[in-house]
Image (cartoon, grey):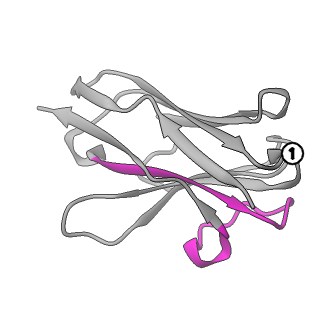
C-alpha cells in the first residue's frame, strides 16, 4: 500500500510558477512509475505528466509540454511538478498517482493504482 500526499498548490498570477510535490509513505516510490493528473470544476480528470521509475523517461500532455517538468527524487521518496508560465486554464486540483508498472509513462488514469488527495492550483488572470 502506498499513501501519497501532494503539496505546493496555491494562488498564482498568470505567467507565474509553482512547484508541486508528492511524497509517499508506506512503500518506496522507486518501484513505481508516477503521474500527475488534474481536474478542473465541471471537467473530467486529465493527464498532465508521467515519469518512469528512474525519471529518465517522461511523457507530457500537449497542453503543458514546454511549460511543466516532472521530476523525481527516489532517495527522498518524492515526485515533483515544476509549473512555469501558468495560465488560467491550468486552474484545477492536481493529483499525483502511482503505477505499479515501473517502466510506464501512461496517460491513462485507470492504469494508476494509488492516488493522493489532491492540491488546488488557482491561476488568476
| Residue beneath the point at 85% across and 28% down | 75
Identify the residue at horizontal 67%, vertical 75% (top origin): 111
- Quarter where residue 76 is shown: top right
Where are the magenta residues, as a range?
Answer: 92-113
Whether residue 41 appears in this view of the structure is: yes
Where 90 sits versus 18, above or below? Answer: below
Q: How crowded is mark 1: few (under 14 residues within 10 Å), some or many (20 or more)?
A: some
Kindly identify which residue carries mark 1.
30
> Where is residue 10 shown, x and y percent of the image?
30, 29
Q: In which quarter of the image is the C terminus?
A: top left
**Magenta stretch: includes residue 39:** no
- In this view, the residue in front, 3 or 72, is 3
Residue 66: tell me if it is visible: no
Say what secondary structure mark 1 lies in: helix
Q: In which quarter of the image is the N terminus?
A: bottom right
Residue 84 occupies quadrant:
top left
Amino acid at each position: 500500500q502506498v499513501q501519497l500526499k501532494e503539496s505546493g498548490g496555491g494562488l498564482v498570477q498568470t505567467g507565474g510558477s509553482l512547484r508541486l510535490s508528492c511524497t509517499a509513505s508506506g512503500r518506496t516510490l522507486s518501484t513505481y512509475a508516477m503521474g500527475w493528473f488534474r481536474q478542473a470544476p465541471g471537467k473530467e480528470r486529465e493527464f498532465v505528466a508521467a515519469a518512469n521509475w528512474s525519471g529518465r523517461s517522461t511523457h507530457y500532455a500537449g497542453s503543458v509540454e514546454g511549460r511543466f517538468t516532472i521530476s523525481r527524487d527516489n532517495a527522498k521518496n518524492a515526485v515533483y511538478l515544476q509549473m512555469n508560465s501558468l495560465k488560467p486554464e491550468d486552474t484545477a486540483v492536481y493529483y499525483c498517482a502511482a503505477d505499479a508498472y515501473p517502466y510506464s509513462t501512461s496517460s491513462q488514469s485507470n492504469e494508476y493504482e494509488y492516488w493522493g488527495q489532491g492540491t488546488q492550483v488557482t491561476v488568476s488572470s
